[in-house]
Image (cartoon, rainbow, N blue to C red):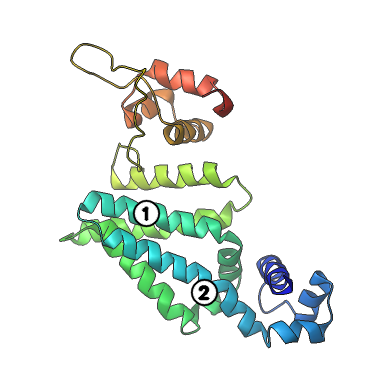
């Protein structure tokens, strides 16, 4: 549809040049339509801005509300963090546009909704009854979730996601994976009669392990984070995703 092509062109140009530096004529030229045809679909740049930012805000508010509905504070925390990252990765070009023209972020109602979402994310990460130390750490974590999406927007989304979540775990002092461990296939068995460390990583954990190793994290530290042996980590580092 023409309106979708217009939005895609506007998103790309706003992210590359900046919102204020991009004219409606430039958007029309990018789409290959006349300026009059462009105004038929969107009567102003402000109208385009609203259509680009509202989906991001709607999704962000939805994932945080869903996380807030949980009972377990630790699960609430990680559902909020993961949802926050996923939304920003899906809308990385829109986020880049907003950061490129920071004055856009002070416009109401966009600014009010962003401030409310960030405040809620801070509260969910800090947890109920958190003191000043927990609240400051939560602010540091939330602030660090979106910046890498903009700074490294050309990196593969899955690798960037794994690294951002690993950084959040480090700040929070949480050695466990952000997501619940994947179910262990029936064919595998824990080592030792009394159980012990699992011998397999789930697909998401394997992807995170590779991303951490590519970023310079030692195999020993990766093994400790996922509670597996170093041999298990090395096996997954040597195995491509298609072979798992």
Q: Which residue lies furthest to the left in this view?
A: 129
Instruction: Residue at 34%, 57% (x, y): give it.
Output: 80
Residue 54, numbered circle: 2
When the figure is inspected, residue 27 is found, relative to residue 164, above or below; the finding is below
Instruction: Name above or below for residue 198 compared with residue 160.
Output: above
* 10 Å crowding of disc 2: few (<14), some (14-19), many (20+): few
Residue 231 location, quadrant: top left
Horizontal and vertical percent position of residue 89:
53, 55
Identify the residue at image location x=60%, y=53%: 153
Determine the CA span between mark 2 and mark 1: 20 Å
Q: Name the residue under label 1.
A: 81
Residue 72: % across, % down: 20, 52
Q: Is mark 2 on a helix, strand or loop?
A: helix
Q: Tell me: residue 230, above or below residue 132.
A: above
Q: Residue 121: tell me if it is visible.
A: no
Mark closer to the chain start, 2 or 1: 2
Indicate the position of residue 101 as horizontal and vertical percent values: 60, 74
Task: Specify the label residue 55 is tagged with.
Answer: none
Q: Which residue is at a point 39% across and 18% down the rendered structure image?
A: 230
Q: Can residue 154 be seen in this view?
A: yes
Asked if residue 223 lies left or right of residue 89, the reply is left
Residue 192 left/right relative to 139: left
Residue shown at the point (84%, 81%) measured from the top left: 34
């Amino acid at each position: 549809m023409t309106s979708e092509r217009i939005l895609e062109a506007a998103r790309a140009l706003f992210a590359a040049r900046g919102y204020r530096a991009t004219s409606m004529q430039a958007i029309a030229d990018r789409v290959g339509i006349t300026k009059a045809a462009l105004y038929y679909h969107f009567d102003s740049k402000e109208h385009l801005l609203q259509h680009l930012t509202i989906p991001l805000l709607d999704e962000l508010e939805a994932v945080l509300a869903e996380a807030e509905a949980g009972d377990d504070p630790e699960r609430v925390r990680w559902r909020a963090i993961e949802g926050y990252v996923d939304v920003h990765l899906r809308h990385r070009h829109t986020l880049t546009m907003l950061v490129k023209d920071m004055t856009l972020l002070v416009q109401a109602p966009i600014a009010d909704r962003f401030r409310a979402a960030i405040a809620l994310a801070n509260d969910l990460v800090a947890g109920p009854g958190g003191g000043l130390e927990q609240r400051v750490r939560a602010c540091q974590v939330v602030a660090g979730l979106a910046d890498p999406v903009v700074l490294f927007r050309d990196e593969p989304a899955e690798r960037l996601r794994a690294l951002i979540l690993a950084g959040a775990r480090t700040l929070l002092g949480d050695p466990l994976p952000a997501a619940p461990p994947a179910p262990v296939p029936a064919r595998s068995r824990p080592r030792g009669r009394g159980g012990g460390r699992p011998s397999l990583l789930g697909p998401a954990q394997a992807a995170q392990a590779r991303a951490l190793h590519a970023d310079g994290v030692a195999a020993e530290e990766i093994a400790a984070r996922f509670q597996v042996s170093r041999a298990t980590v090395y096996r997954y580092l040597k195995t491509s995703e298609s072979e798992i």
